[in-house]
Amino acid sequence: MHKHTLTIPSQFIDAFKHLVSSLDPKAIDDYCISVIIDAEKKSILFVGGVSPNYTQLTIPMNDSPPLRSCQFAFPGEFCRLAITVLELKETEPTLQRYAPILLNLTLSKGKYTQVQQTPTFLPNHPDEKQSDYPAFRRFALSAVQEAHTSYVNNNDNKAFHPISKTMLQHMIQEANGHLPFDYIEMNSETSELKIQRNGQLQHTALAKHIKPPISTVINPQALDNIKMISECDSNNIEINLEGEVLTIRNDEQTISQSLGDVAAFYELAPPQKSTLLVGFIDFFYFKKELTDHKKYPSLKKENLCHLLIDEGEMFMLSICKGHEFAQQIPVQHLKQTYQGLFTFHPKDLERTTLKGLAEAHEMKVAISQFENGEYDLEFFSEHQQDLPYTSIPLTNKQDDIEQYLKLKATCLSQKTVTIEVPETQLGLFLHIED
């Protein structure tokens, strides 16, 4: 019998840990990691997971003596319980995070039959005492899982589409802005965004800078996989969506994720709504008042703002602990006859992708009412756009409108004073203002 060493380099250990974490003891047939060693290509391929949520990892083979071409499987118990990952002190970001994993393979009669991790210890490490009495754990190898080899072969025949890391990061940012969700679809053909949350569908416009190579549907688990691929050094990223399985890969890693009952998501229709009014606001004043809200501890804690529409004018108003706040928002083309009072939570806007429109000055907004009686404040990136870029829920507070009409009148009645400043002191005055 001979011993050969299979080394998992430190830069692949995060990916290997992800692969191990996908194992499930309840999935008896899949409770293993298949290993395919190709001596000619000098590569080692690992496959594992629970069908159809498989992960494939390829690492270079630099071991001496070189490993033989062979196929086998590590038992799930060995991977999850016997492999120890030694995390190093991160004194500098450029240093390795982990010590390499060294696995001893027993070669008997021309094939590998057993696996054991070589105990690895470091001076001054918290586990240093264990080096005196290292535990012995050696496991018998099993046959490679046929479903795993089929997965590898199928990936070679799938129609993958290249996607840039920048585009992937844009998609991640967009998806993060809509968490939590059941599903989210970024339709590259119609430039539409569909979000399902708690069984309810929201239909908006997709940001112009987001153009995935294929229309992509993801769930939270698929989003985690996309994030992992985007954080790798490789820039060669490809994506595939077939049926209910989304697969994303780079040079070393391939991850597949079932989207569950995605067919029901495709069939789900957006709720019917009616648009109560449309206007074009000066977004500078709207954004400035939201920013000011966060400056006052009482307002920030209350997280509530009133939106008043009256006589073709719009106001953002708050009354909190006897303090009164009001800001008129310049607006055009509002119905002169419409009068309404709503509340919204400023933090809802922080969770949206509205930051992408921060430079806009005249922005199209609308207030819509749904069949169930709920309201939305919708924001549009373009004047001619029918689908909102994003939206937040509103609560109708018509019963309180008289109190806020008085605050509006007080705001409009305040007087401004122009201070005459000598030209010689103007620079000093401006400096103080800054």
Image: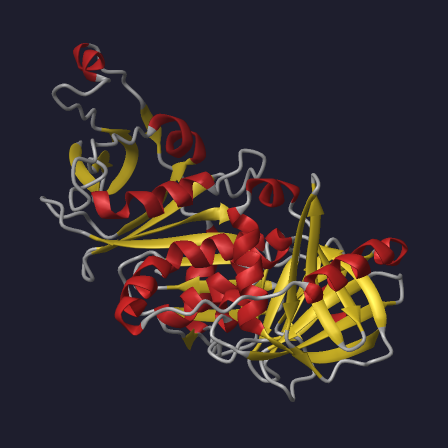
Q: Is residue 263 left or right of residue 3?
A: right
Q: Quadrant of residue 343?
A: bottom right
Provide residue 320's location: percent of width, then percent of height.
69, 43
Residue at the far left in the pictured view: 64
Measuring 57% from the left and 58% from the top, which residue is drawn there?
290
Measuring 48% from the left and 40% from the top, which residue is drawn there?
23
Residue at the far bottom in the pictured view: 384
| Residue 339 or residue 351, whichever sits in front | 339
Q: Quadrant of residue 201?
A: bottom right
For the N terminus, which image quadrant? top left
Whether residue 264 appears in this view of the structure is no
Measuring 20% from the left and 49% from the top, which residue is drawn there?
68
Provide residue 82's location: percent of width, then percent of height.
35, 26
**Snapshot colouring:** secondary structure
Q: Is residue 376 left or right of residue 415?
A: right
- For residue 48, above or below residue 321: below
| Residue 23 or residue 405, whichever sits in front | 405
Measuring 83% from the left and 75% from the top, which residue is drawn there?
276
Provide residue 160's location: percent of width, then percent of height.
44, 74
Q: Quadrant of residue 197?
A: bottom right
